[in-house]
Image (spheres, rainbow, N blue to C red):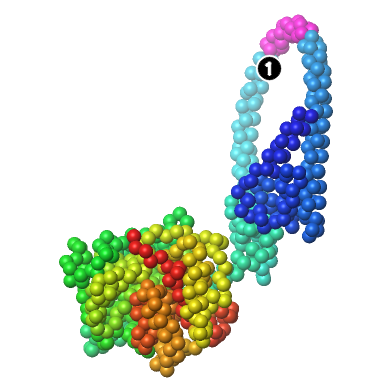
Amino acid sequence: MKHLINLMSALSLALYVVPPFAAHAQDYPTAMVGDYQVICLPDPALPCPDGAFCTVLTGPETCQMDAEQAVANQLAADQAAADQAAADQAAADQAAADQAAADQAAADQAAADQAAADQAAADQAAADQAAADQAAAEQAAADQAAADQTAADQAAADQAASDQAASDQAAADQAAADQAASAASALQSAMVGDSQVICLPDDQTPCPEGAVCVVISSPGSCQADAEQAISFDQAAAEAAFQDAQAIAEAEAAQLQAETEAAADPSIVPVEAPVPEPEAVDTLASVLANPEPTPDAPMAPAMQVAAADVADLTTAPEADAPPPAGVTVTTETVTTTVTRTSYQEFDTAPVRIGTDKKSHLSDLEKVGLVALGALVIGAMINDNRQQVVSNTGDRVIVRQYDGSYVVYKDDNALLREPGSTVTTQTFRDGSTRVIVERADGSQITTIRDASGRVLQRVAYDNKGRATILIDDMQPEIWVDVRDLPRPRPNRTMIELEDQNAALRAAMAAADIEDLGRKFSLRQIRTIPQVRDLAPTITMNTITFASGSAAVEPSEAARLNKLGKLITDLIAENPNEMFLIEGHTDAVGSAASNLALSDRRAESVAKALTEYFDVPPENLVVQGYGESELLVPTGSDERANRRVAVRIITALLQQTAR
């Protein structure tokens, strides 16, 4: 009975303690049996959370009955175990007593047997001595005969050993083959087309040589996991093939362009800028960490030298002496050096001879020398990433997981005719850019070596500061499971809606209820975060195939959007907008990403040119074919779109 009470106490503790699975327990029905809570699993294949007491439902509404039966069964099993333990103990005690008696009798018999054995041994010793003498004589004769025989046997043995070694090796090879076949036959397998895939129970189990293997995610998911693995491999192989083809075509085109440029007397070569070694190292670190992680939410991109000279309290003096080791360039922007929304982007420069180029790229002109110097096809970060495209204004890098990242000058929109731009370039590749306008106002921006804006502050002509972007703050990790679902009636704003501004305000109020802010990088790269921002839909702007230029006739259709944005900024000067570009799935993923980003920039420029939208309140980002509205690989107009999100309520804008 004491043992039964102990068992009952153990069961009670097992049922009472709330382990870490409690965060997911609410996903299944539970029932109370006395003081015990029992989890009812809908499927016997589902694992019971560690430390819990579970039963399997026999019907949709039988949780309480099944739980009571399960507890009763457990108590009955514990009682049976206690009774059996008592019976086993009694039998063990009797067996021990019987064994003790048997051991004593055996000891007595052993003593008598030993005395008789000692006498027999003495008699045998005398007989053995006589026999030994006789055997010694016979042995001498036998040894000689044996020596002769040994020589003959050794020759035969050597031959036999050679034959046996060959036989043993063949047997070992066969055994290894049998072992591999036996191991493979013990594992699950699935057929995907003509390919047989072996499903390993964990990533520690070796895959048989020559086989295609995948680690299953659950006991019954072999077929699904095999199909997904084959599909992923095929998609990755197709993307790698497209990239290799695009790189080969780009390299061939570049060689052709270099040949033509070298023969063109009208081209005046310029010195090819050489990036600082520290800038190259910093850029490699930035490219290796495009996304934050739970253990490192603030990536090395945020550790920039330009931040050490930033003073947000007053507008900086563009002509002030720069810190030591900083390169400074100053330019008055004219219409001849800027691109309008209806113009295409410049071609990428080509090399002409040693250390010469046909012209500087847009990235090199604005101080992003290390980024602009990346060569198409180059493998970086231990060959985990590859430069797929460098168009002079944008660099596309394929990540180790097959995804793509676009790097560009986030300050391109600010280079308006009539403004004076002072760029301070630091040895680590970071920059501090001061844009001074004719009315005395200024925009100061800090960028890392990849061109990404880390901080942007607007100063009016009286020196009063408005912080627009501040990614210099440490990022707080985002668990998308904790984010609320967007409310479509507030997050989707139609330009025809007379209450568009009101909807935007209500969506902002919903975001404020989250009690947290996000970095611009998180808003750009995490779809679940962006989905919280109110979106102004636009399906009327179209582009020619492969073009990023907005025709003036198309720009006129932006009238209502431009008016809404200017009204919102007039009411709130730090209002920020994300201009998104999307494409269909025709063409390579890398080229679509660059094209979508360029189109987003053109739309943003059109808003400034035609409707005086302040460019510092706009951020552009292309997503290529990664977020299709219509899931198809064909030429689908609905996927070629531009959208505008109001991200102010999400964005952290408080300086350090």
Please tell me whether residue 542 is drawn above or below residue 227 in the rendered image: below
- The percent position of residue 261, horizontal first and vertical second, equals 28, 85
Please tell me whether residue 343 is drawn above or below residue 17 in the rendered image: below
Please tell me whether residue 77 is drawn above or below residue 22 in the rendered image: above
According to the image, label 1 marks what residue? Answer: 138
- The percent position of residue 346, horizontal first and vertical second, equals 33, 84
Q: Amino acid at mark 1?
A: Glu
Magenta stretch: includes residue 653:
no
- The answer to which of 553 and 174 lies nearer the viewer is 553
Q: Residue at x 47, y 88 (%)?
A: 541
Would you identify the image quadrant in which residue 44 lies?
bottom right
- The answer to which of 565 and 3 lies nearer the viewer is 565
- The percent position of residue 440, horizontal first and vertical second, equals 23, 77
- Badge 1: residue crowd in 10 Å (few <14, some 14–19, many ≥20): few
- The percent position of residue 430, horizontal first and vertical second, equals 30, 66
Residue 170 in sight from this viewpoint: no
Q: Which residues are magenta?
A: 111-134
Residue 147 in sight from this viewpoint: yes
Q: Residue at x 28, y 72 (%)?
A: 459
Magenta stretch: includes residue 116:
yes
Horizontally, residue 160 falls left or right of residue 303, namely right
Image quadrant where one finds the N terminus: top right
Horizontally, residue 166 falls left or right of residue 513, namely right
Horizontally, residue 517 falls left or right of residue 345, namely right
Q: Residue at x 29, y 80 (%)?
A: 415
- The answer to which of 166 and 444 lies nearer the viewer is 444
